Image (cartoon, helix red, strand yellow):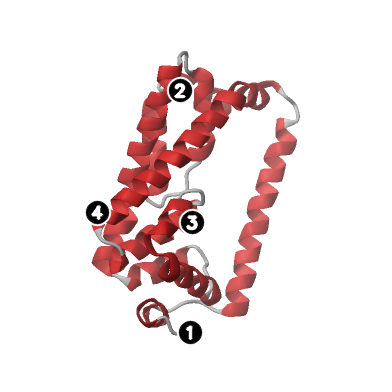
Amino acid sequence: MDLLQAHLVFLANHPFSVVFWSSLIEAAGIPFPSRVILILTPAFLATERDLVRLAIVATIGAVLGDHVPYVAGRLAGTRMLALYCKVTLGSARCIERTLESFRRFGPAALLLSRFSASVRLFASACAGCGRVTYRRYLAFDIIGTVVYTTLCVLVGSLIGERAVVFFTTDRRRWLFLGFAVFAAATLLGYRLWRRFRYGGVLASDIEKVYVTGERG
């Protein structure tokens, strides 16, 4: 676990920079363990003021990163949603349900989307397609992100040190890592099965549901 130890040392030496960039990268749509990093980082901080700074830095990074799918939705419209669906192995049924929820709840969907990386990215792209003005999008995105980062920092302040000790010294960490790999493989298998059963999504299908609310 020397590689993990080296990463933790780097995190301890540059906590705010690592949290900022990891939050931005994942929010922009690139898979990255920003949530794990955010929860572990409080273990390397000394004061409560540092915890507040951490939440602020994470919020700024995430909100800036969220602009990537939002702007892409503005520029490419439903073609962006179709591309994201293809990359994430989304099915026609999955996309239809997501769009229906967004159409029904509007900007309020952004508040809860922060707690799921895939849903958040899709919600930001939906907002960029024209359903939500930039001011409203930014307001809801900031509120949801502040709540999300604050909760993660609070959790990290409670379990961060124990988590670091677990990943560096506890032999059961191998069992945990094995379970994480199994869970990821199961999720991938489920998405492939769902894609095979319900089919892929075309930009024209998304346009039909998104604009008119009709079911295909």
**Residue under circle 3?**
118
**Residue under circle 1?**
215
* Residue at x-position 44% and y-position 70%: 104
User: Could you say whether the residue bearing mark 3 is in a helix, strand or loop?
Assistant: helix
Q: Nearer the viewer, mark 3 or mark 4?
A: 4
Q: CA distance from mark 2 to mark 1?
A: 50 Å
Local crowd at mark 1 within 10 Å, few (<14), some, or many (≥20)? Answer: few
Q: Mark 3 or 4 closer to N-term? A: 3
User: Could you say whether the residue bearing mark 1 is in a helix, strand or loop?
Assistant: loop
* Residue at x-position 58% and y-position 73%: 195
Residue 21 is at least partly visible in this image? yes
**Residue under circle 2?**
10
In this rendering, the answer to whether 119 lies above or below 142 is below
Q: CA distance from mark 3 to mark 4?
A: 23 Å
Q: Which amino acid, mark 4? A: Arg
Q: Which amino acid, mark 2? A: Phe
Q: Nearer the viewer, mark 4 or mark 2?
A: 4
Q: Position of residue 79 (x, y in %)?
A: 34, 72
Quarter of the image with the N terminus is: top right
User: Could you say whether the residue bearing mark 2 is in a helix, strand or loop?
Assistant: helix
Q: Position of residue 194 (x, y in %)?
A: 61, 72
Which label belongs to residue 135?
A: 4
Q: Mark 2 or 3 closer to N-term? A: 2
Q: Nearer the viewer, mark 4 or mark 1?
A: 4
Residue 7 is at least partly visible in this image? no
Image side of residue 214 versus residue 125, left or right: right
In this rendering, the answer to whether 94 lies above or below 144 is below
Local crowd at mark 4 within 10 Å, few (<14), some, or many (≥20)? Answer: few
